[in-house]
Amino acid sequence: MIEIGLKHTSELIVSEAVTAIAVGSGDMPVLATPMMMALMENAAMQAVKDYLPEGCTTVGGHIESSHLKPSRIGETIKAIAEVKKIDGKKIEFEVAAYSQDTLIGKGTHLRFIVNKERFLNPDNSTQNKTKKA
């Protein structure tokens, strides 16, 4: 069961592959903001994945974050996500990213619990409902 306070930390080492130049979000060889936010999303997904019903996962619905400081190639970045609110299939997280002990970004993230099969095959779900009627 998903509970308020569940946390997870995800980590990456900044490489050329995750720089603003590589992902096209800027022209500097520093951690790209979209990659920092992807790490935050990963931490949120990981925080709850072991508490979901069988056949379910979570998908991102909204993310909002600051990016306060650049991170250079070779730095280790940690993103922490903590469950703050649960409303049915909607889970709200507080997210933050750090380079060592320095906060480099913080914000909020919203994820929804979905059935994997229905999410990937929405037409099949509609057809099944129609056939039953």
Image (cartoon, grey):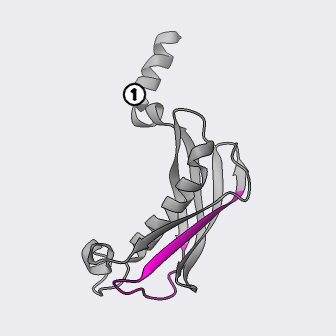
Q: Amino acid at mark 1?
A: Asp
The image shows residue 91 at horizontal and vertical percentages of 64, 52
Q: Residue at x 46, y 24 (%)?
A: 126
Q: Secondary structure at mark 1?
A: helix
Residue 49 is one of the magenta-drawn residues: no
Rendered view: 130 above or below 28: above
Rendered view: 76 above or below 92: below
Few, some or many C-alpha atoms within 10 Å of disc 1 (few <14, some 14-19, many ≥20)? Answer: few
Q: Residue at x 35, y 85 (%)?
A: 30
**Which quadrant is the N terminus positioned in?**
top right
The image shows residue 89 at horizontal and vertical percentages of 64, 43
Question: 71 or 37: which is nearer to us?
Answer: 71
Rendered view: 117 above or below 62: above
Q: Which quarter of the figure has residue 33?
A: bottom left
The image shows residue 25 at horizontal and vertical percentages of 32, 77
Question: 126 or 25: which is nearer to us?
Answer: 25
Q: Which quarter of the figure has residue 95?
A: bottom right
Q: Residue at x 46, y 66 (%)?
A: 39
The stretch in magenta equals: 65-84
Question: 92 or 6: which is nearer to us?
Answer: 6
Relative side of 20 to 126, left or right: left
Q: Residue at x 52, y 42 (%)?
A: 57
Count of marks, rendered view: 1
Rendered view: 10 above or below 87: below
Relative side of 32 to 116, left or right: left
Residue labelled with disc 1: 123
Residue most extreme to the top: 132
The image shows residue 32 at horizontal and vertical percentages of 37, 77
